[in-house]
Amino acid sequence: MKASPNQIFSLTLFVVISILITGTVLAADNNAGYGPDVTLSFSRLDTLMLPALGNISGLTWMGPDTLVVLNDIPDSLSESGDREVRMTFQDREGEILRMEDFTGVLHRGLAWDGEFLFSCGDADDGSSILYRIEPDTLMVEEAFDAPGNRPSGMCYDGRFVWITDRDTGRVDRFDNEVGEITRSVVTPGFSPFGVTFDGKYMWITDSGSGRLYRLTGARRRWSATVSTDSFMMRGENVLLLHDGQSFWYVPEGEHFAVRIQMQ
């Protein structure tokens, strides 16, 4: 029996509507748990004491048991009476393993890519310099121009070093293989500071909004925000790090890191 034109039109319309509905449902499923309106929370577990020298301006895990900390010591606290910057190596118990003077070279941020340490310093003209440091000798192996003038937090995602810049409201991707910034992403909030990577997601603290954000995928898309009940530190520069198992954050002005568990 041959279908009439009306029957053919109705059948075609039904198929098109079904495809659209199915696609919408699949898209919704694929995006479940994503988007700026998704709210997360965390619980606080314990703390790790850090060197009680001035301000903590950068830190990174160098392997599972060694924490590297950058201490910015103001002239009022230093033995020399001048501002000093020291790189301190410690274990999980807080015991100091090594300490080196980087005064006049480094100022903020630390990251470890499995081969080199990376940190930033201020140039005389107000620009910033990204340093690649050999871990055994702690000699500067190479220096690169850093974008912006207020690099703050740093992390390594398994391929690239990422650097937050709170003055420009973005996070910049440094490719060590080519020695250049190869991507910049505008972040939620307007003053990004701490940054870390947990193996899947990037996390950023913002001193302007006081919030903690999750970014997803290669394009670092804003995918969730930690609730204000768990994290709200407006006006504070909070550093982040991840040791391969747990998140840690360092409240501004404190000499301890708080270990947290996302829920």
Image (spheres, rainbow, N blue to C red):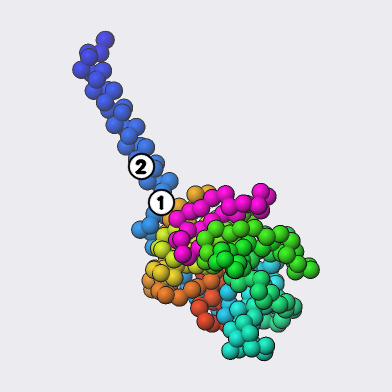
Numbered disc 2: secondary structure? helix
**Residue situated furthest top in the rendering:** 1
Q: Which mark is residue 240?
A: none
Cα distance in 3D space between marks 2 and 1: 10 Å
Residue in the foreground of this view, choosing between 50 and 143: 143
**Which x, y percent locates residue 47?**
57, 79
**Which x, y percent locates residue 177?**
68, 50
**Which x, y percent locates residue 258?**
54, 76
Instruction: Identify residue for label 2.
Output: 25
Name the kind of residue labelled 2 in the image. Val
Give the prevailing secondary structure in the magenta stretch: strand
Numbered disc 1: secondary structure? loop
Left or right, residue 12 beside residue 247:
left
Residue in the foreground of this view, choosing between 220 and 108: 108
Name the kind of residue labelled 1 in the image. Ala
The segment highlighted magenta reads 165-186
